[in-house]
Image (cartoon, rainbow, N blue to C red):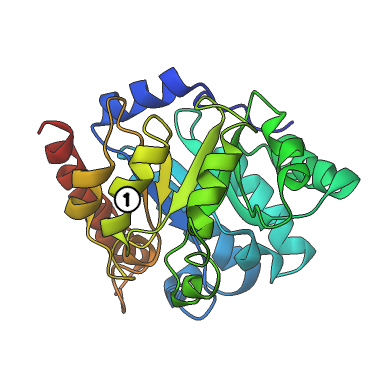
Amino acid sequence: MARKGTLVDRDKLFEAIQAKQSYLCVGLDPDPDRIPSCFGAGVEALELFCNSIVSCTSHVAVAFKPNLAFFESYGPAGIEALHRIVDKIPADCLVIADAKRGDIGNTASKYASALFDSLGADAATVAPYMGEDSVRPFTDRKDKWTILLALTSNPGADDFEFHGTPPLFERVLSRSLTWGSTDNLMFVVGATRPDLISRIREIVPESFLLVPGVGAQGGSLSEVAKVGLNSTCGLLVNSSRGILYASENPSSCDAANQASRKEAENLAMQMALTLHR
């Protein structure tokens, strides 16, 4: 049976943010080259490592974002492990399937069903390049969140996202508002471009934003909070490598967990301060 999360409701998500005084999303990107050796090897190490991250950070995290590529690279056993990991994530944490799906028709519908029904994710990242009919199978699910790529944090974003008048990322934001609502549609906005988040807030003032790029990619939490927070927080700020690999050469699994817990708690503490400004 697929996991049943409780944060697919916008009000419940805000309540969780208030209760934990945090809007932290922990990215689960289990790189086999970086998983500490104390966890073992192969799929068993992947599963033990991810479960330990969830266990030591779920008290301050309101969301977990497994990146499907890292699990798919292990083959069928990796996908099976992902299902077990998702099933163990507490119901008071949003599960975001970072899949960046983008197709049309029945294919898109099957992608939505695979992520929402089979995996049990509460939300999924979707690429809008093919337009409305590639997104609707996701946003038609009113009981789930669709997280649309808008302004990404990678250098290659300059290739397309800033072209045109208005730039493409602004047209994605404006046009997609008719495909869903603030209750089931979020947007990915990279932390490495905080100067543009204020402009984004003009277009989508009430929407939640999923913000990657804090930490290892150089994004600033304080700058993102300054321009991105709204009356219901409206932010999920993701940290992946900074938390997962907080200790480069841990002496034990306990030491690795302690370092990850400390990093997550430090981020949550900074977030709590921004919520009280």
Report the side of 276 relative to 152 (left or right). left
Q: Residue at x 30, y 32 (%)?
A: 233
Report the side of 190 relative to 169 (left or right). left
Q: Residue at x 52, y 41 (%)?
A: 174
Q: Which kind of residue does numbered mark 1 sit on?
A: Ile
Q: Residues within 10 Å of mark 1 (few under 14, many from 20)?
A: many
Which quadrant would the N terminus be assigned to in this image? Answer: top right
Q: Which quarter of the picture shows residue 76?
A: bottom right
Q: Residue at x 49, y 70 (%)?
A: 157
Locate residue 9, reporting x and y percent.
51, 21
Locate residue 185, reporting x and y percent.
55, 34
Locate residue 25, reporting x and y percent.
39, 47
Residue picked out by circle 1: 197
Above or below residue 262? Residue 233 is above
Circle 1: element type: helix
Asked if one can make out residue 29 in the rendered structure from this viewpoint, the answer is yes
Locate residue 148, reporting x and y percent.
57, 47
Report the side of 251 relative to 95 (left or right). left
